[in-house]
Image (cartoon, grey):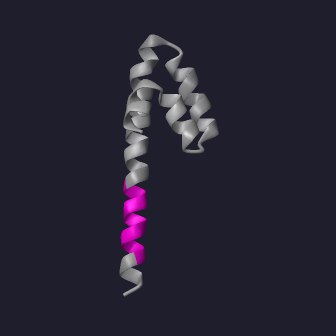
C-alpha cells in the first residue's frame, strides 16, 4: 500500500474510502510539482491511519483486562 501511496497518491486515498480527499489529492498531483507533496501527504496519512489502528487495538486490549 505504501508503493501505491507514492506512485498513485489519489488512488491510495480512494482505496481507503476517502473520496473527497482523493479528489483534492488528484487535483494536487495533476501538476508535476504537486506530485511530490501529494505523495508525501498520502504516505504520512497512511502511516497515521496505521498508527491509529494500532492504538485502538492497544486501548481495547488494556480495557479488557
The C terminus, quarter of image: bottom left
- Lateral position of residue 19 relative to residue 1, left or right: right
Tell me if residue 55 is in the magenta stretch. yes
| Outermost bottom residue | 65
Q: Position of residue 31 (x, y in %)?
A: 50, 13
Q: Position of residue 13 (x, y in %)?
A: 53, 38
* Numbered disc total: 0
Where is 48 relative to 6, above or below?
below
- Lateral position of residue 25 relative to residue 54, left or right: right
The residue positioned 60% from the left and 44% from the top of the image is 17
| Predominant SS along the magenta part | helix
The residue positioned 36% from the left and 71% from the top of the image is 58
Q: Which residues are magenta?
A: 51-60
Query: On the image, which quarter does residue 23 sit in?
Result: top right
Q: Position of residue 35 (x, y in %)?
A: 44, 20
Q: Position of residue 9 (x, y in %)?
A: 47, 29
The residue positioned 37% from the left and 55% from the top of the image is 51
Tell me if residue 43 is in the magenta stretch. no
The N terminus, quarter of image: top left
Amino acid at each position: 500500500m505504501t508503493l501505491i501511496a507514492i506512485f498513485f497518491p489519489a488512488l491510495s486515498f480512494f482505496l481507503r474510502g476517502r473520496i473527497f480527499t482523493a479528489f483534492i489529492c488528484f487535483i494536487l498531483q495533476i501538476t508535476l510539482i504537486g506530485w511530490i507533496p501529494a505523495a508525501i501527504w498520502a504516505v504520512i496519512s497512511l502511516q497515521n491511519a496505521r498508527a491509529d489502528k494500532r492504538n485502538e487495538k492497544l486501548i481495547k486490549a488494556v480495557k479488557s483486562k
